[in-house]
Image (cartoon, rainbow, N blue to C red):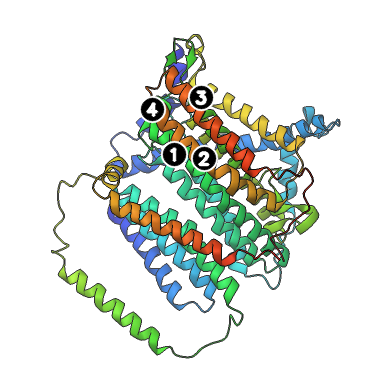
Amino acid sequence: MSKSIDQIFVSAKHWLLSWLDGSPSWLIQITSSLINIFALLAVFLTLFALMSVLERKILGRIQNRYGPNRVGPFGLFQPVADGIKMLIKEDIVPVRADKSVHFLAPILIAAAAILALGVIPYGRNMTPFAIDGGILFFFAVGSTTELAVFMAGWGSNNKFSMLGAMRAIAQMFSYELPLLVTVLPVVMVVGSLGPDRIVAAQAEYTYGLVPRWFVFTPWGAAAFILFFVSGLVESNRTPFDVPEGESEIVAGHMTEYSGFKYATFFMAEYIGMFAISGLGLTLFLGGWHAPARALEFVPSYMWFFGKLSVLLLVYVWVRGTLPRTRIDQIMNLAWKFMLPMAFTCVIAAAVWHYAGRGLRGWLWSLIVIASVYIVLSIVLDTRRKFAPRVYRFAE
Amino acid sequence: MNTAAFIVIAIVTLSAAMAAATLRKLMHAALSFALAIVGLAAFFFLVGAEFVGLALVFIYIGAVAVLIVFTILLTRRDVQKDRGFNWSGVLIAAAVLASLTWSILKTQSTAIVAPHIRALTVKQIGQALMTTYVWPMQCVGLLLTAALIGALLLVIEEKP
């Protein structure tokens, strides 16, 4: 019973494809891909609509106000109203803008974000696009975002847009390095770049009790925190949202966008956030595996989306709690702290592997990470609580 | 299926490459170059060499294309000014064309497709890099680190 519920979407797809029995193989192949794409878009666009209203409601609660509560029950139809508003808004393109580049930038940025969703395993046998180098695919697609942001900034022919794009690209480049390096220990330990293999490696339970998720090892916990912070930066979320810091540079690279193009940017940002959280929980939080053997009757995709919701809640929580950082602080954090710590995670994972992957390895890798952390915090301490501001940018 | 995909990708790649060579605005040319690279990566995907295609996208779109557009942005002031016919460019293009033609003609007949080439997996490539080619790879790593430090030294400010 639980098995058939677990596989209900896979069976539904097979049932749909069975209508095409006897047709040429290319037709079946294309239909299969189209079903995957439609399912992905339906699920994640719904999630985007839900997230946009829930985020505003949770932020409202954090800031001791109501949040949207006028449209529909509990304000749940707010995204519909927003969508209609965005659709019928006038689409303004600046006279001096580079029309084609200005037009293509939001499309490219949304395409990159949606493509990245394709390689994440959402449940047992539920990877839309299962390839050998799935993790690499995710980051390769993600790296085109920088070009899209540049196109948006340059094509608008606006100083605020260009400055915002520069900031965005600078911080995305700096954090792509720790992001990639924190993925390395997992890839090393599993010995594969495929997300399915990585999820499968986290299936068992130590002593039948503690799941073998990588976040429960010292290197995994450290790498997960680094990954999460880098993910915050990559998706331009508070506290790292300087590219669109509205008190400084209007809206960054999105200044000259209005109406549905702006909505596309907004959507791409959220989809990117879903993708990076999905990858994070695939790598470190056991993917679609249940946290205990007794809970395995709950379908695998429920676990995936449950974990995803928890991560997204943390995103909103961080946004409601922390103030925006300065660009020089962000850069310093990336190069002086995040990168050395990320490399330490790689070394700690190697130590864990060679000490036998047991309790001994656990302690040794904890020692490695703790000692590097202590040394780094001593070296990086400025010994002044309120150091005078030193601007190394925009001089 | 594969033939149709090949023709579509070939048309996209070639037209993007043509656009990169002929467009008046330098920035448009740079972006078309990026599109041509995506087309090349699609070819690698088509023949099952995923790793090469992904590395191509990763390096050329994520790094080289961004480097090119920033170089254009930061150096060119007279974007629209026409420099007239460029003879040295013709010379370089002719040399590149000649060497490419020579190397294509020198290869064993391209019409014969090896029937049983197993697609290289990422794992095999990684093992080859870490065992057979470990010294060249370390040298490349050292070179890149040196370049990184050199770039830092160029932009670092003297403290007053």
Question: Between tags 4 and 1, which lies in front?
Answer: 4
Image marks 1 and 2: residues in contact by CB distance under 8 Å? yes
Q: Is residue A351 above or below residue A203?
A: below
Could you tell me which residue is drawn at 37 percent across and 33 percent down? Answer: A17
Q: Secondary structure at mark 1?
A: helix
Between marks 1 and 2, how big is the CA–CA gap?
9 Å
Amino acid carrying label 3: it is Tyr
Q: Chain of mark 4?
A: A
Could you tell me which residue is drawn at 69 percent across and 61 percent down? Answer: A393
Q: Chain of mark 1?
A: A
Could you tell me which residue is drawn at 41 percent across and 18 percent down? Answer: A358
Q: Secondary structure at mark 3?
A: helix
Which numbered tag is attached to residue A353?
Answer: 4
Where does the image place residue A93, in percent across and percent down from the top left? 69, 65
Between marks 3 and 1, how big is the CA–CA gap?
26 Å
Which residue carries the number 3 mark?
A: A301
Between marks 4 and 1, how big is the CA–CA gap?
14 Å
Which residue carries the number 2 mark?
A: A342
| Residue A96 seen in the figure | yes
Where does the image place residue B131, in percent across and percent down from the top left? 26, 44
Between marks 2 and 3, how big is the CA–CA gap?
30 Å
Q: On the image, which quarter does residue B113 sit in? A: bottom left
Which residue carries the number 1 mark?
A: A184
Instruction: Say which label, 1 or 2, has the lower sequence index.
Output: 1
Amino acid carrying label 2: it is Ala
Q: Secondary structure at mark 4?
A: helix
Image side of residue A228 versus residue A58, left or right: left
Is disc 2 surrounded by few (<14), some (14 to 19) or many (20+) residues within 10 Å?
many
Between marks 2 and 4, how big is the CA–CA gap?
17 Å
